[in-house]
Amino acid sequence: MSSIAVFDSGFGGLTVLKQLQKLMPDEKYIFYGDSANAPYGEKSAGELLELTSEVCRRILEKDKIKCFVIACNTTTSEALEKLEERFPDQRFVGIEPAVRWAVRENPGKKILVLGTTATIRGKRLKAQLEELEGRAEISLLAATGIVPFVEGQNPDREKFEQYLRDVLRPFRKDTDCIVLGCTHFPFVREELQACFDKKIRFYDAAIQVAEATKALLEADGCSFEKDDQTGRGSVLFMNSDPGKIEKEKELLKEYD
């Protein structure tokens, strides 16, 4: 039984893995967090391609892979096509900020897109914004302090919460909803909500990615193999910093 591989710059991709498990609980998974090289959001396209190519190679050493799920908006924006060229025999599913979804449900309203620097500047988000021009009032913010906090690189919660209040202050009163443009960001929904004067709706593309992955595997006839129970429902955790593997397991259990 081959695996679905999910990878990210660190712990953020666990939010995508959780949605995949909810939708396809019988599949076997490999999760790779590249915590030693986090964050990806400040790296060049060339650096990203080399880092993620190495991640794919390491995963392929462990098992046959039916699909790579890129649980990183930055990597999807900057490296997806190149990865497909480097690994032509593999299927890839990427992720991008759920701006279309947010605009569809909030036409004419004020939408804040949070992301890494690379995602906010990236071509995929730019294409979405051009497509949706005039349909909502969309603001962009590179929230660079969130990934290091989630990864445990800057663990001071008080300073982190002050950082969020500072960067979100211009949006505090008028924002109607927030697009979480990085898979790390759902881990701090409560801290984000605390920065606003009213209840905020959050849009997380992980749900859409899980649905797209399931549809791709079903269309290709390679979804869960009922006759092969090997590793059914299991997750193999990997990390470029092996000391972070236990934290991956812990966070996956805690996240809902």
Image (cartoon, rainbow, N blue to C red):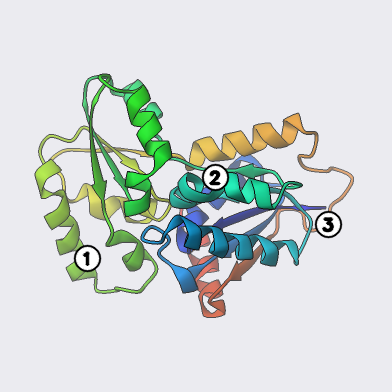
What's the CA distance linking mark 2 and mark 3? 22 Å
Name the residue furthest front: 46
Task: Give the label on residue 85, or none.
Answer: none
Name the residue furthest bottom: 243
Residue 116 seen in this snapshot: no
128 and 173: which is toward the camera: 128
Note whether 6 is above or below 225 in the view shown. below
Note whether 202 is above or below 185 in the view shown. above
Q: Position of residue 30 (x, y in %)?
A: 66, 59
Q: Secondary structure at mark 3?
A: loop
> Where is mark 1, residue-wise?
160
Q: Position of residue 232 (x, y in %)?
A: 76, 53
> Where is mark 2, residue-wise?
19
Kind of residue indicated by mark 1: Phe
Give the label, 1 or 2, closer to the camera.
1
Q: Residue at x 32, y 45 (%)?
A: 120
